[in-house]
Image: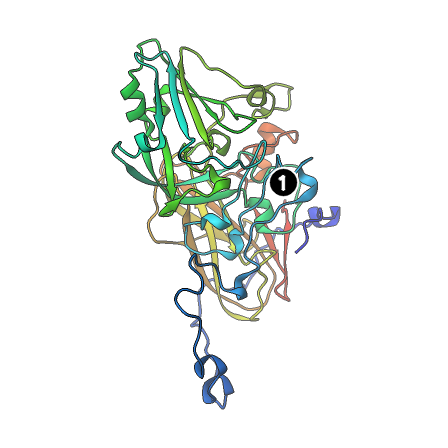
Amino acid sequence: MTDEPVSPSRRGFLRSTALAGAGLVAGAASARAAGPDPKITEVQDWASSFGDAVDAAPYGSPIRFESHVVRRNVEWLTESPVSSINFTPIHALEGTITPQGCAFERHHSGAIELSKQDFRLMINGLVEKPLVFTFEDLLRFPRSVTTAFCECAANGGMEWGGAQLEGCQYTQGMIHNMEYTGVPLRLLLEEAGVNPEGKWVYAEGADASSNGRSMPLEKAMDDVMVAFFANGEALRKEHGYPARLVVPGWEGNMWVKWLRRIAVYDQAVESREETSKYTDLMPDGRARKWTWVMDAKSVITSPSPQVPIRHGKGALVISGLAWSGNGRITRVDVSLDGGVNWQPARISGDAKPKALTRFHLDINWNGEEMLLQSRAIDDTGYLQPTKDELREIRGLNNVYHNNGIQTWWVKADGEVENVEVA
């Protein structure tokens, strides 16, 4: 797969008519006709000898046939891999839970090794009694479990100026969704006793960048968690071991890793990077700040540029993800013709608030070109906008919070490209 920029001719790809006969009703899935297939009629090697013993892999890893399902980075995207980002292979995953080993990571000064024995979490500022917790102290508090997506504010940011990167992983892969176990931050703040004048909390990490972030006290006392397990196991090093913040529905830079301090203040305390980077530039030169919530968004993960259609005409399962930082996904629509016509997709499994939701649409593809799009609707009634609708408000100088509709051009031969329609 390539991450080379798309040529201007691709960006200019236009299609305004419905794609008749693309297949609105799914046909029955096909099976091979019965016949003398040696994979069935002859004994294979794997059935004629012993396989690996149970202790061959004390910590299991994916089979070698899935070695392509890995995080990837774009070398020219940042100046240094120490302060950089990689992308979840969302095109190759199903369901909603992201394995930790595949989950995108963002570092500001590299992933550090911090042991549980060396871990300390301080709570100070406008509190009745400043406290320092060890990791063992945290384990004594009542725990909660939540499933939440973590999305980088720059997810899809390269697409503001037009279709740029070839791959669902590269365009929308700065996201993961995991089940977290930890202590509600509210309990730790209550233990310290927040003074009446306390209105904001400032969280910082133990790494060299500290990655300090401010948030209103109301959010901190609501659903924020100090997490130490993800998907049932300890956090991975790159995800903030041994403890990190989980801030459901809010942009990923708020999810401070290697957490070391929570300070309560009467006003926001802004780090230099927070002030200079995490703002949304507007066409008139102003910048929106504190745009924490990630609005409703969706993307079709298959077919997509890294998952072309290989089986030819016939039954085709369209699969994708939808999410909203404002609540629960209630509906996802899919278009086969670039937004001219829409039909509801099937939401598969539970649609949890502030978590990834899987959707499917079963069609019978007749081999004609398609312009695949999806749009998400959450329980506030918010409808995912087109890119042009966003650009009318924010212009082209933005980087963050691009939740515009993504378009994939499916060609007659099954190959797929990242394009835009007008």
Q: In this image, 168 relative to 118: left or right?
A: right
Q: In the rendered image, is residue 34 in sight? A: no
Residue in the foreground of this view, choosing between 41 and 96: 41
Instruction: Check the image and report above or below for 40 versus 343.
Output: below
Instruction: Check the image and report above or below for 66 versus 373.
Output: below
Residue in the foreground of this view, choosing between 372 and 79: 79
Residue at horizontal 53%, vertical 54%? 91
Residue at horizontal 43%, vertical 56%? 59
Furthest-front residue in this view: 117
x and y, in percent, of residue 344 in the image: 42, 52
Q: What colouring does the structure picture have?
A: rainbow
| Quadrant in which the N terminus is drawn | bottom right
Residue in the foreground of this view, choosing between 392 and 67: 67
Residue in the foreground of this view, choosing between 86 and 387: 86
Q: Secondary structure at mark 1?
A: helix
Q: In this image, 290 relative to 184: left or right?
A: right
x and y, in percent, of residue 292 in the image: 47, 27
Residue at horizontal 48%, vertical 59%? 318
x and y, in percent, of residue 309 in the image: 57, 65
Instruction: Check the image and report above or below for 158 versus 30.
Output: above
